[in-house]
Structure formats: C-alpha cells, structure tokens
Amino acid sequence: MLKQKSIFGASLILACSGFAGAAQAGCDGPPFYIPSSIAELEAPITVEAGTGCAFGLSGIPGAINEVKITQAPKIGRAGVQNLNAIYVAKPGYQGSDEFAYALIGTDQYGGPMRVIIKRKVTVVPKL
C-alpha cells in the first residue's frame, strides 16, 4: 500500500493564467486542491480558441524538478515551459479536448512528489 504525505496542512491550490501575452480572460477554471504529494486529479478549464494557458503552482513546500506531459491533447497542443504546463487551443476549434501532465519533485519531507493532473478542456470561440 502506498503511503501518502500531505503537501501541507491547508492543501495546495493550483491556478491557471494567460500565456504568451494572452489575456487572463482567455483561460478560465476554478482553483483546485492537491491533497497529497502522490495524487491523480481531474480539473476543468475553459479556453478561448487560439489562446494559450500556462498552469503553475504557488505556495508549495518542497520542490518541483520536472513537469512532463503524460497525455497529449487530441486537438490542441501541450508543452512545458519554465516548469509550467502549457495548453494552446486550436484556432477556430470549438468543443472538448483533454490532456494530462505530471508534476515531479520532492515534498517538504524529502519524499517523492508525483502529482498527475488531467485537464478536461472546453474550447469556446474567441470573443
């Protein structure tokens, strides 16, 4: 059985932001909590067509050493820049997509950290 350690008492909040000069309005999704340093989660995100979003962490005790795309999107593009996962919606596309990424590192106790986040993407027309 895998023993899970809490990342920190109050839990970690993951947020998204606009990417490469895109406005924050191009990406929208609720913050969510990562309950432990070994976890698999799903989180929704709405992205305007042709817009990119970067997904980063704040307030994490421990260290993220690597971010990997573990499931490529079928329609858009995903990658990693500066330890942030990035998703770029296909211009003109409207509909659903999904991708996943892993945050890999060491928790605040020196143990392993591997958090996999599957993003359920809804791409909407650019306004």
Image: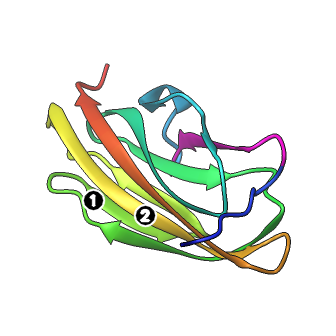
Q: How many residues crowd mark 1 within 10 Å: few (<14), some (14–19), many (20+)? A: some
Position of residue 92 measured from the top left corner of the image (x, y, whole percent): 15, 36
* Residue type beneath disc 1: Arg
Q: Is residue 92 left or right of residue 107?
A: left
Q: Quadrant of the C terminus?
A: top left
The residue mark sitting in front, 1 or 2, is: 2
Which residue is situated farthest in the front direction here? 1
Q: Is residue 104 left or right of residue 12?
A: left
Q: In this view, does 30 lie to the left or right of 113?
A: left
Q: In the figure, residue 71 lies in which quadrant?
A: bottom left
Closer-to-camera residue (70/18):
70
* Residue type beneath disc 2: Tyr
Q: How many residues crowd mark 2 within 10 Å: few (<14), some (14–19), many (20+)? A: many
- Residue 4's label in the rendered image is none
Q: How is the image coloured?
A: rainbow
Please say if 22 is above or below 78: above
Position of residue 96 measured from the top left corner of the image (x, y, whole percent): 18, 36
Closer-to-camera residue (97/112):
112
The residue carrying mark 2 is 101
What secondary structure prevails in the magenta region? Answer: strand
Please say if 17 is above or below 118: above
As for residue 63 lying within the magenta part, the answer is no
Q: Is residue 79 left or right of residue 73?
A: right
Position of residue 14 measured from the top left corner of the image (x, y, whole percent): 62, 44
Position of residue 68 measured from the top left corner of the image (x, y, whole percent): 45, 74
Boundaries of the magenta span: 9-19
Q: Distance between the residues labelled 1 and 2?
A: 12 Å
Q: What secondary structure is found at the residue carrying circle 1?
A: strand
Which residue is at a point 82% across and 52% down the rendered structure image?
A: 8
Which residue is at a point 73% across and 63% down the rendered structure image?
A: 5
The residue carrying mark 1 is 77
